[in-house]
Amino acid sequence: MTKYFDNPLERLAPEGVKVPAELRVGAVRITPATVLAPMAGVTDTVFRRFIREMGGCGLLMTEFTSADGVVRWRDATAKRYLHFFEDERPISSQLFGSHAESLAEAARRIEAHGFDMVDLNLGCPAKKVVKCNGGSGLLRDLPAIRQIFEAVRKAVKIPFTVKFRAGWSEDELVFRELARMAEDCGLDAIAMHARTRMQGYSGQAHWPWIAELKTLVKIPVIGNGDIRSPEDARAMVAETGCDAVMIGRAAASNPWIFRQIAEHTATGTYTVASREDRYQMIRRYFSLLVEEGHPGAIGRMKQFASWFTHGVEGGARLRKAIYDSREARQILDEVDRFFLAPKLLEDAAAEGDATRTVEAMSPGCYDSDNCNG
Ligand SMILES: Cc1cc2nc3c(=O)[nH]c(=O)nc-3n(C[C@H](O)[C@H](O)[C@H](O)COP(=O)(O)O)c2cc1C
């Protein structure tokens, strides 16, 4: 994947511009106006609660879920996959699919399950999803999208939103028609990742498209793409006038980002996590995974170790030790040893900081053929 994340644009906003304190989507109050982006393989209940606990995130979103799957599941399976805790509210459940009836039925079940909002995914670039016309595949079939909008709108009372990419390619931009259609069909808000499907994650997100959306519709517009810091969040609001910001990858490597945005909004400055904060955060997240009896706990720990140690001096050494570990306990021991042993720190400093070259976060299954969502 292109490592644009290592080479951000310098984004500046005029004094006084702030990320809004509140967004209303239908009857749901989102305070502040910040949203954790849906991320397959990342935003499960453990990660969502972890972000909520850190503070500053107004709305949590689930990973995308197959509408056909939701419709097929028996009660026990649905309970397992759709489970969330009360402290995750407000929470939106994201669905993908291509059949209006199945999406409408899935949305009904999502509402019955107690979610505050339901969202439709029109952005997933995974070939397996696109092949069945789901995710960004639907971007080439606006009449089908209208049918889905109408069917889901009729099926539920909770706010219904859509998250999309700007179009299939630069030559097939549909965000303008799509936004108007969403408003016509009674959707409560729209969120756009300002890239095309063909772009994948390369290049920069094109924020002027988000600004254009704001001139086209009255329903709230949530801006998404390439926010890496509180300064970026403010700059997106300044450049686009969006009603809320949505953050994905940066939340996985810097789970404090929402809290930092809130602090920045309140005081104009924000606290950068210390090494000790990072240590406590990794321990806390890993213990949540273990307590939860998360079936893939070890895999998740390994995956998150690489994101969480971005910017930590000598982090490459810890990542290697974690990758070589086979048990959760061993991983926790490695984390303790790394953060608590000053000798290792000195060695790492002497070797030079291997983590300065930050690896971009891979969208994993979301961006490949193996998507099983
Ligand atoms: C690992 C990963 C999984 C993702 N899964 C989803 C998903 O399930 N649904 C969705 O709408 N977008 C998904 N996305 C896209 C993000 O929600 C977001 O639109 C994108 O990462 C751009 O935002 P960012 O620059 O803040 O990361 C995923 C992205 C990543 C990196």
Image (cartoon, grey):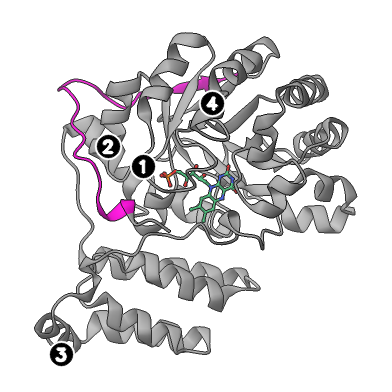
Near mark 4 (Cα within 10 A), the count class, few <14, some 14-19 or many ≥20, is some
Tell me how far mark 3 sits from mark 2, CA to CA. Answer: 37 Å
Q: Nearer the viewer, mark 1 or mark 3?
A: 1
Near mark 1 (Cα within 10 A), the count class, few <14, some 14-19 or many ≥20, is many
Q: Label 1 CB, ligand 1: below 8 Å?
A: yes
Look at the picture and state if 26 lies above or below 299. Answer: above
Q: Is residue 165 magenta?
A: no
Quarter of the image with the N terminus is: bottom left
Asked if the residues shown at circle 2 and circle 1 are in contact, with their CB atoms under 8 angstroms apart, the answer is yes
Q: For residue 339, which quarter of the picture?
A: bottom left
**Amino acid found under the numbered disc labelled 1:** Asp
Q: Secondary structure at mark 3?
A: helix
Give the residue at mark 3.
343
Q: Nearer the viewer, mark 3 or mark 2?
A: 2
Q: Secondary structure at mark 1?
A: loop
Near mark 2 (Cα within 10 A), the count class, few <14, some 14-19 or many ≥20, is many
**Amino acid found under the numbered disc labelled 2:** Asp
Give the residue at mark 1.
226
Give the residue at mark 4.
173
Q: Residue furthest front?
A: 171
Say which residue appears at 78% left-offset and 19% top-offset.
Answer: 150
Give the residue at mark 2.
232
Q: Nearer the viewer, residue 350 or 46?
A: 350
Q: Position of residue 225 (x, y in %)?
A: 41, 39
Q: Nearer the viewer, residue 6 or 263?
A: 6
Say which residue appears at 21% left-offset and 87% top-offset.
Answer: 341
The range drawn in magenta is 4-28
Look at the picture and state if 344 lies above or below 188. Answer: below
Residue 256 visible? The answer is yes
